[in-house]
Amino acid sequence: MQDTNNQTPPPYDLHIHTGLSPCAVHDEALSSVIVYAQEAKRRGLEIICITDHFALPADWVPKWYENSGPEIIQRVRKAAAAADSDVEILVGCEAEMVAPGRVTIDAQFARELDFVLLAASHFHFNDIGPQRGASPETAASKMVEYLDAAVRLPFVDAVAHPLVVPNDPFGDPRAVAALITDDRMHRICAAAAAHNVALEINGAAAVHERYRDATHRLFSIARDEGVRFTVGSDAHSAPRIDTLDAAWDFAGELGLAREDFLDPAVLLGRRQDRG
Ligand SMILES: [Zn+2]
Ligand SMILES: [Zn+2]
């Protein structure tokens, strides 16, 4: 991929799950760090970040996260060091906002990672957010509450798939997003810009028209507020890095230019700062 114009998205995938994520494919040939690096190279990417689901142990952490502690980070770090790849492999995580302000990572542990992605809309989990079947109004108001809290956390680099709830437990995501006012979105995005928290254009979501429609207004407002964006495939097996194409197409539809994205050099610089 050549950087031929300012519409070209950055050559990275900052959202990848290995077999260490409970929901990913547990197959070395499909979901190991090395296979992702090979697939990324084939697609012309320069940087990938492994972002398995992560939670520091705590009694309020959902049981689903019980094998997702610091030991998985150590395993990814080892695999990345052994990968011997031209692709830069960053070690990050997808942490969880369990309740507004209550997250499964802290500032101290975040310093050990290259990139911290925070999911603030995993409401398909029973113990997070409103329950399946809640009204669109309740879903929208909780979504806003979580997102607003997420963009104010200084150790978060980007919010994963904003406004996207897997499996649509509250019906059509466009109807939910439509209940959030422009004014509310402006205030959230201004906070994100002020706290240097990026919003992710998520490939796995962007393949679906309903999610592109549901997030279009938020992302347009974010761009106007000077928020940075990241792109991530959210692949759960290496072939699914291909959803980046949908993320890039969507970024093009949104009119995002290269400077709207978190710059790869800035990203790598943060890594060094954290040392
Ligand atoms: Zn997620
Ligand atoms: Zn994910």
Image: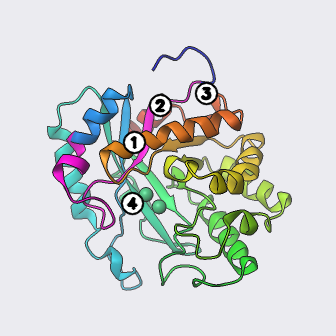
Residue 260 falls in which quadrant of the image?
Answer: top right
Q: CA distance from mark 4 to mark 1?
A: 30 Å
| In this picture, residue 99 sits left or right of residue 17 | right
Q: Which mark is residue 241?
A: 1
Q: CA distance from mark 3 to mark 1?
A: 20 Å
Q: Which mark is residue 264?
A: 2
Q: Are marks 1 and 2 in contact (CB under 8 Å)?
A: no
> What percent of the width, then of the height, locates residue 230?
54, 42
Q: Residues within 10 Å of mark 3 (few under 14, many from 20)?
A: some
| In this picture, residue 196 sits left or right of residue 243 | right
Which amino acid is tagged 2?
Pro
Looking at the image, tell me whether mark 3 or mark 2 is earlier in sequence order: 3
> What percent of the width, then of the height, locates residue 254?
71, 38
Q: Are marks 4 and 3 in contact (CB under 8 Å)?
A: no
Q: Residues within 10 Å of mark 2 (few under 14, many from 20)?
A: some
Q: Nearer the viewer, mark 3 or mark 1?
A: 1
Please tell me which residue lies in front, 193 or 46.
46
Residue 147, placed above or below residue 47: below
Residue at mark 1: C-beta within 8 A of ligand 2 = no
Question: Disc 3 designates what residue?
Answer: 258
Question: Disc 4 designates what residue?
Answer: 108
Looking at the image, tell me whether mark 4 or mark 1 is earlier in sequence order: 4
Q: Secondary structure at mark 3?
A: helix
Please tell me which residue lies in front, 49 or 28.
28
